[in-house]
Image (cartoon, rainbow, N blue to C red):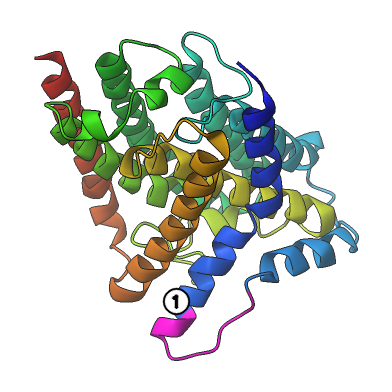
Amino acid sequence: MSTLPSIAHVLLALLLAPLMPGVINRVKAWFAGRRGPPLVQGYRDLSKLLHKGAVYSKTTTWLFVAGPIIGLACILTALLIVPLGSVPSLISFQGDFLLAAYLLALMRFFTILAALDTGSSFEGMGASREAFYSALAEPALLLALAAMATQSGSLSLSPIYAAVNWHAMTSLAGPALLLVAAALLIVFLTENARIPVDDPNTHLELTMIHEVMVLDHSGPDFAMIQYAAMLKLWVLGTLLVGIVIPVRSGWWPVDLAVGIAGLMALAALVGVIESVIARLRLIRVPQFLVAASVLSILALVLVMR
């Protein structure tokens, strides 16, 4: 099989990932009756940060510097493993869905280490919350992918998502795939620090989770963190869009275009969610994440019957 579709997906992801936060912010602005920032604001922010200098505290070590670099490297590697619908991934092998999940975990691990390396109790608070919530989100993600692997009979993401089509959605596997999609939506919102789990626009000490961990980063380091977060939106979004929009035309430019349109529609949906519901209380977030695991387990039970 030609690698051209896979290369095109990776290149378009690198180019278009900053558009997803732009779509989210424009939708939220529309609900609030404001004009809102331009769609290309993400590109402008990255450009400004890359032209600034980085400031390092005397209390930090090499872990603080390595955190953004390793985080970006992890999500770039995950991008090579995750397909977009029927467009295969650039790197594919049996069990690659486990590597993709652990790359996301490794990215989070070094972000937490960089936050703890500052010696700030404020960033330590956010790091502890991030670690706790990730311990609940990762099982839901792995169980959801395991259910899809069982349904497709493969342990590689590209064949797993190639098996998801309209026929599968209208067959006995349809309810299980819908349960997986619901679980992945919860994981998507959690992993990307979106409402109702976290508010990316707040700076209140008692509610910040992800944002508090990167407060001491600046300049190019913060640009890498922001760009990695944009790519994470894209990577986790492909896992959800590949199920919800099972277009398999057989012509990869059409499938790729539909997948990208689906990712932008997902960004718009996130904007709607953040506009119509409030952030959950911290003690309710674990229940929200356990619900995702329950949905994944139900899906796994259905496909194993």
Q: Quadrant of the C terminus?
A: top left
Residue 228 sits inside the magenta stretch = no
Q: Farthest residue in the bottom direction?
A: 33
Is residue 176 in sight in this rendering? yes
Image coordinates for residue 276, horizontal then vertical, percent? 29, 74
Q: Which residue is mark 1?
A: 28
Q: Residue at x 21, y 39 (%)?
A: 178
Image coordinates for residue 88, horizontal then vertical, percent? 54, 25
With 42 as the anchor, is 303 left or right in this view?
Answer: left
Closest to the observer: 297 or 289? 297
Which quadrant of the figure has residue 5? top right
Image coordinates for residue 155, horizontal then vertical, percent? 40, 12
Q: Amino acid at mark 1?
A: Lys
Range shown magenta: 29-38
Q: Farthest residue in the left direction?
A: 305
Q: Residue at x 36, y 75 (%)?
A: 275
With 73 as the anchor, is 36 left or right in this view?
Answer: left
Q: Quadrant of the N terminus?
A: top right
Q: Residue at x 83, y 59 (%)?
A: 219
Q: Residues within 10 Å of mark 1 (few under 14, many from 20)?
A: many
